[in-house]
Amino acid sequence: QKEVEQNSGPLSVPEGAIASLNCTYSDRGSQSFFWYRQYSGKSPELIMFIYSNGDKEDGRFTAQLNKASQYVSLLIRDSQPSDSATYLCAVKGNTGKLIFGQGTTLQVKP
Amino acid sequence: ETGVTQTPRHLVMGMTNKKSLKCEQHLGHNAMYWYKQSAKKPLELMFVYNFKEQTENNSVPSRFSPECPNSSHLFLHLHTLQPEDSALYLCASSQDPPYEQYFGPGTRLTVT
């Protein structure tokens, strides 16, 4: 089992829809969870982080964490073509290392 | 300059060359990281430095040699690389303990 698992996609949604990106992790002791956005040919850019169970909202983005299910998700409301990118989930486990998933490619179609 | 900067942005080198990648962070962080990103693979952590001391080396071949002279600068010295080392090399920094990491723009390395 991979330490951090994401569906590679592509996930295709129409403009204005809600995009839902999911991530599962294997280390039950994980404490911190991060979502990065990476445009093609660019470096990852931090968009959200979450430490506690529940939801955290920032503009059109909502991160959701369920530690019991070892599941973290990112919702993007009112998706725009400029949101088309690869979204990386990263989890900091007990070792303190940040482990990245392979990323989910999101395509928002006009 | 703000954030994390990396030079060069692109590098083509032969297998017998020696080159160095440079990273500088302007965020006042005390931890710096080197990652390798190959096509279709997750980001691979290579090295971690906290307060200039190397705290992690993820079984990286000795043809990659890191150097951290101070908390703001990080180098990756390259020698006798292989074509499979071609990848995007990313530098990141964070405050210790490893809170959120901020990435530089990366160096696209091609080994011929």
Image (cartoon, rainbow, N blue to C red):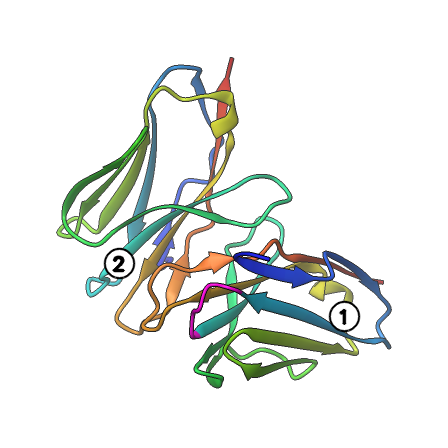
Query: At label 2, which amino acid type do we have?
Result: Ser
Q: Residue B12 colored magenta?
A: no
Badge 1 density bin: few <14, some 14–19, many ≥20, Cα 10 Å: some
The percent coordinates of residue B109 (x first, y second) are 74, 60
Residue at mark 1: B82
Tally of numbered tags: 2
Q: Say which of A74 and A82 sits in front.
A: A82
Q: Residue shown at 72%/61% (left/top)?
A: B86
Q: Quarter of the image holding residue A60?
A: top left
Residue A59 left/right relative to B28: left
Q: Secondary structure at mark 1?
A: loop
Q: Is residue A94 above or below residue A63?
A: below
Q: Both on one chain, marks 2 and 1? A: no
What residue span does the magenta drawing correspond to?
B26-30
Q: Secondary structure at mark 2?
A: strand
- Mark 2 chain: A
Badge 2 density bin: few <14, some 14–19, many ≥20, Cα 10 Å: many
Q: Quadrant of the N terminus of chain A?
A: bottom left
Q: Say which of B9 and B70 sits in front.
A: B70
Q: Which mark is residue A32?
A: 2
The percent coordinates of residue B35 (x first, y second) are 55, 65
Q: Residue shown at 38%/64% (left/top)?
A: A98
